[in-house]
Amino acid sequence: MSAREEDTLGEEEDVMEGMDDNDEGVEMEEEEGADGEEGKKVYIPGIEPLQPGEELDMDRSAYRMYHECQTGAPCLSFDVLRDGEGEGREHFPVSMLLCAGTQAETALSNRLLVMRMHNLHGTQKEKEGEESSDEESDDEDEDDDKKPKMELAMLPHYAGINRVRVTRRGEQALAAVWSEKGQVEIFDLRDQLEAVHNSAAMAAFIKKKKEATALFSFSGHMTEGFAVDWSPTVPGRLVSGDCKKNIHVWEPQEGGTSWQIDQRPFSSHSKSVEDLQWSPTEATVFASCSVDQSIRIWDIRSPPNSMLAANEAHSSDVNVISWNRSEPFLISGGDDGVLKVWDLRQFKTGQPVANFKQHSAPITSVEWCPTDSSVFAASGADDVVSQWDLSVESSDVGARVEGVKDLPSQLLFLHQGQSEIKEVHWHPQIPGVMISTALSGFNIFRTISV
């Protein structure tokens, strides 16, 4: 890392201080015109396009928390690292740890990042009545105290990063990274985690000028890919899939620095494997989806063929899947813009139990809420994050949104304001909080709906 890059890192440690929870968003602003609320209406993507001269205006009352941040080069994949600050954290301010990988313009400019975002406050309540100048001055001081902060520890990674997934294994914090090298690499994040928590450790980390050195890497895929997932039941167990249809299972070895990988791939797909998900309850079972339009369920005890398959799950590429943690349901999202819910007890029928066509472009990410088994979220290439609740019974939603009668009853919320959204994740320890990444940066938010 050059001296110039060290300076850049120092600046990026404070990126989030400048991207606070004010109203200056990427594409959304809260500016009340001279007429106050007059002339405003609810904008529903896909129902009616914006007219010339119309602008999106963020309604902050719809959010319990909303922040933005940017990290230089876009991070098109990230994951949330669990921390030691407890489960079910409801009180502000909150903090979180993220691991992300960049897709910079040149291979040498890419980085593997660990971010610590903290002092994240909720959206402020509207002030009541007029305030004196002294009160306004006090408010300014209070606003300074509420500015969000971010520490950023980054290592050079000389290839664009396709996907990042993290796990904890004992004292290790591990990141599995699929990159344009055509390799899946495992990195130990402990030095980066120490750096974002301690200023002296950060100074030492920067001084080392260290590049990302993999704890372990696997080149057996022979081509690049995107699909990778850590097992939630067997610490260190991994599955990875590539663009030539092959899937490999990784078994952790003693010592925590190596993996045994069966060279015989799981190979029932006929085209690129796009996403993989381990069963949350059965240690040997995982699911996959593919450009061949199918979703398959596998058991690692009986390779190389899948146990169950929905061969025409979508009318085009199946991009993403998510396995419910407490119910036998799987969600899928495809290039057709459709979200489908599958009951695994009826998977052999090849028919989903629910279809939702709200997005107007390919689905890029989907994930069940970790604290509510009926709620899930999705993102699409239409620059929208949607939140859904399957426990809501069908009814006329015109009563909820005046003048709009074409929305599914299960649709809770549509979040906008980012450009080319790639991934969205719930925070596993902070109920209702979501993080989304796009070419335009990160959004960290909680809506009033969840």
Image (cartoon, helix red, strand yellow):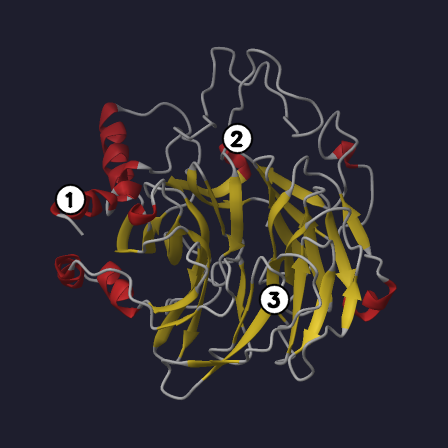
Label 2 vs 3, first from the N-terminus? 2
Which quarter of the picture shows residue 258? bottom left
Compute the Cα span from label 1 to label 3. 42 Å
Quadrant housing residue 371: bottom right
Q: What element carries label 2?
A: loop
Amino acid tagged 1: Asp
Residue 21: x %, y % from top left: 37, 37
User: Residue 12's spot in the image, x, y percent?
Assistant: 25, 44
Circle 2 is placed at which residue position? 59
Q: Which of 394 and 352 is in front in this view?
A: 352
Instruction: Report the disc number at residue 246.
Output: 3
Q: Could you tell me which residue is drawn at 75 percent across and 52 percent down?
A: 340
Q: Is residue 44 above or below residue 172?
A: above
Q: Name the residue: 85% across, 58% down.
A: 351
Q: Name the residue under label 1.
A: 7
Name the N-terminal-most of marks 2 and 1: 1
